[in-house]
């Protein structure tokens, strides 16, 4: 198999030591394994700044979307109504989930390269008192825009709404203090900034909100409350858990600590992202999102000219050791480069040299 680095927003490049944890077969009802689950749950809570008396962590089998669906399905009852703020494909996916489940919702959609406007949200909340929940994506991985969760947090507190944040691609790579932001449910997954492998998602949830979810779920598998009730006893998952993935994740959490925690990881990602954008700009690639709104996670670049072929470019870069990501915008030609995972400045410099050569620019 070709050995290349993934510059995609998950699954991403992981360390050999994380992958090696998967060489053992573990038993789901053994104490060692159950305590691994408990350790993970406690550690995630600590990273989120959550007090175990007020918050808890629930792990959920499947990809990240499964966990988003579990939260929507369990937290929002048939009497509730969600305001879903969207500016990209992952926000749209939440809308789709709401439609499938039959949740009452209102979408507030803004352009892919723009922030939602505070006054407009305020007006919606004033005018539509049926709204009980506000749902939004933090880093919209579609474009790499970093949405203003603090601003919406203030509105959510002011209007006393339940606040759900999809922080899939940012949690672990940026400080997010869940209690300070008044977030009731924060969702992320194993294969993003914690640098584990894919197989489960997790939710940091306010305990009082979670308790109130009993009986809301329209589905057995996606019942977050039931999952929590079982897991909190002693760390045994409801139904088979992805044992290898869980072990790899526990190792990835240790490695996050060894790196210096979230602040150190954030600096590495931010540095990767800054170098990537600066150097590609010199080579002639312009980022779709302006610097102030750009996340340190993933960047969307516009095609540099009419004759640019992404397929050709992709193959050239892949042969030289890096896998890029196609664009996800419908109205404009773009591609994306992620800079999270086991990726360092040296990798980004090498990538930029490869891209420079491809473009036939010999600056260096
Ligand atoms: C990765 C991601 C998801 C989940 O995607 P899956 O493919 O289901 O893992 C959801 N939201 C955002 C913002 C993401 O980046």
Image (tube, grey):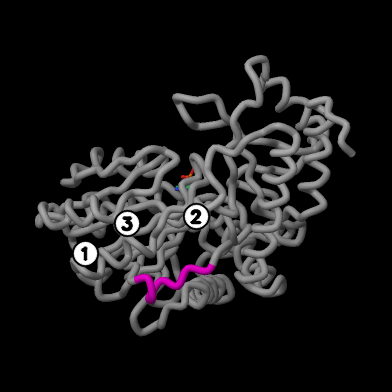
Instruction: Please report whichever mark, 1 or 3, sits nearer to the chain's N-terminal start.
Output: 3
Instruction: Please report whichever mark, 3 or 2, sits nearer to the chain's N-terminal start.
Output: 3
Image coordinates for residue 35, horizontal then vertical, percent: 54, 76
Residues rendered magenta in the picture: 175-181
Image coordinates for residue 110, horizontal then vertical, percent: 33, 41
Label for residue 200? 2
- Position of residue 346 relative to residue 93, above or below, is below
Give neighbour class at mark 2: few <14, some 14-19, many 20+ (Cα, 10 Å): many
Name the element at disc 3: helix
- Position of residue 13 relative to residue 285, above or below, is below
Label for residue 161? 1
Residue 259 image-quadrant placement: bottom right
Q: Quadrant of the C terminus?
A: top right
- Position of residue 275 relative to residue 235, above or below, is above
Image coordinates for residue 251, horizontal then vertical, percent: 66, 67
Residue that label 3 marks: 71
Instruction: Give the number of callouts.
Output: 3
- Name the foreground residue: 96 vs 339: 339
Ligand 1 near label 1 (Cβ, under 8 Å)? no
285 sits to left or right of 213: right
**At 35% from the left edge and 69% from the top edge, which residue is drawn?**
205
Image coordinates for residue 326, horizontal then vertical, percent: 59, 31
Give neighbour class at mark 3: few <14, some 14-19, many 20+ (Cα, 10 Å): many
């Amino acid at each position: 198999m070709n050995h290349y680095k993934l510059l995609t927003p998950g699954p991403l490049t992981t360390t050999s030591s994380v992958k090696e944890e998967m060489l053992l077969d573990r038993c789901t009802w053994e104490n060692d394994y159950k305590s691994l689950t408990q350790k993970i749950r406690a550690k995630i809570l600590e990273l989120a700044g959550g007090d175990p008396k007020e918050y808890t962590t629930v792990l959920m089998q499947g990809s990240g979307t499964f966990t988003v669906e579990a939260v929507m399905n369990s937290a929002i009852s048939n009497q509730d109504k969600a305001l879903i703020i969207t500016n990209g494909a992952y926000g749209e996916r939440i809308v789709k989930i709401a439609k499938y489940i039959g949740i009452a919702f209102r979408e507030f959609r803004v352009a892919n390269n723009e922030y939602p406007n505070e006054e407009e949200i305020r007006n919606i909340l004033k005018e539509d008192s049926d709204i009980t929940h506000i749902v939004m994506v933090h880093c919209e991985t579609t474009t790499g825009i970093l949405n203003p969760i603090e601003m919406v947090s203030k509105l959510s507190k002011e209007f006393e709404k339940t606040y759900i944040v999809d922080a899939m691609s940012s949690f672990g790579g940026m400080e997010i203090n869940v209690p300070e932001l008044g977030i009731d449910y924060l969702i992320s997954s194993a294969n993003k900034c914690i640098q584990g492998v894919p197989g489960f998602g997790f939710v940091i949830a306010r305990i009082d909100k979670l308790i109130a979810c009993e009986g809301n779920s329209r589905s057995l598998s996606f019942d977050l409350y039931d999952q929590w009730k079982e897991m909190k006893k002693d760390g045994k998952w409801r139904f088979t858990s992805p044992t290898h993935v869980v072990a790899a994740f526990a190792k990835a959490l240790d490695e996050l600590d060894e790196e210096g925690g979230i602040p150190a990881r954030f600096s590495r990602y931010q540095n990767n992202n800054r170098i990537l954008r600066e150097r590609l700009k010199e080579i002639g690639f312009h980022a779709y999102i302006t610097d102030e709104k750009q996340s340190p996670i993933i960047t969307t670049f516009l095609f540099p000219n009419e004759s640019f072929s992404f397929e050709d470019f992709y193959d050239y870069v892949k042969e030289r050791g890096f896998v890029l990501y196609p664009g996800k915008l419908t109205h404009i030609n773009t591609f994306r480069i992620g800079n999270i995972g086991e990726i360092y400045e040296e990798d980004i410099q090498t990538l930029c040299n490869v891209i420079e050569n491809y473009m036939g620019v010999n600056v260096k």
